[in-house]
Image (cartoon, grey):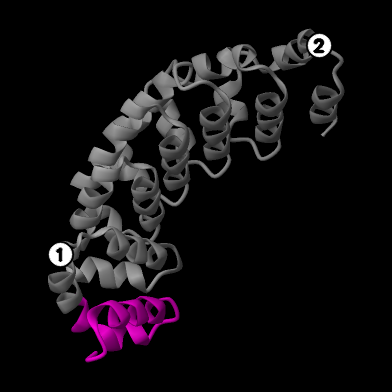
Amino acid sequence: YRVQEALEQAASEEDRCALAQELRGHVCQVISCPHGNHVLQKCITTMQPESLQFIIDELTQHEGSVVRAAKHRYGCRIVQHLLRTCPPTQVSRIAGRLLEEAAALACHSYGTYTLQRMLEFGTEEQRYQLVRCVERNATRIGLSPVGGGVLEAAINHAALKDKVWIARAVAQDPKVLVAMARTKVGHSCVLLVLENLQQGEFQSVFAGLAQHLDTLRASRFGRKVAAEVCRLNGPAQ
């Protein structure tokens, strides 16, 4: 706590860099420390992006370090802060490592949040590549208990034409939609999928979901999806 306070109260960037000097060579160890990760977070929030290059360099120095950090309960916070704070060009190596394992990270309880930040703050090209990966792996991601977060972020941040393609990929199998609709993370994504399907595609998707209305109504979050299906599919249901 004293180091964090010192970083906040430092009179200049030079003073903050001097305090952060102690972390050099130890980033990959500190990143997974219950206390040390807070010091790294404070560095990221108080120092200039160019002063944070040593964190990026050490994190990308060894194969697999970025992905391990993204999957760690503390490390994922550091990666997210870097994606949010630093210019996309500065964290391009981090983004590249994340893209290589994007399908697995989207299904991971901590990795999913890192990909959501990348969709939010990445370059247009990084976002495009991630959206394509999400589209190709929509079924796998949709069936994951946490995958709905990445799917929803992909639709929200994708280009207009890509929103439709992601929605179509998710909606291909009614069982995926039903599984997602029954979870806190997934049900809002299902509503977004329905919203982004084109008019001519509604009927077949709704017909598939209509067979599972009882299952949907039996769950807290599924009831919201069931109500929307009935509203859009007409009063008969």
Helix, strand or loop at label 2? It is helix
**Furthest-bottom residue in this view:** 236
Query: As displayed, is residue 21 above or below residue 198?
Result: above
Mark identifier at residue 201: 1
Say which amino acid is labelled 2.
Asp
Q: Foreground: 125 or 147?
A: 125
| Distance between mark 1 and mark 2 Cα atoms | 59 Å
Which x, y percent locates residue 142? 29, 58
Residue tagged 2: 15
Give the magenta-colored segment's residue range: 209-237
Q: Foreground: 191 or 96?
A: 191
Q: Residue 167 is drawn in which quadrant?
A: bottom left
Mark identifier at residue 53: none
Does the segment drawn in magenta span residue 229?
yes
Q: Foreground: 10 or 71?
A: 10
Which x, y percent locates residue 140? 24, 54
Say which amino acid is labelled 1.
Glu
Which x, y percent locates residue 236? 22, 91
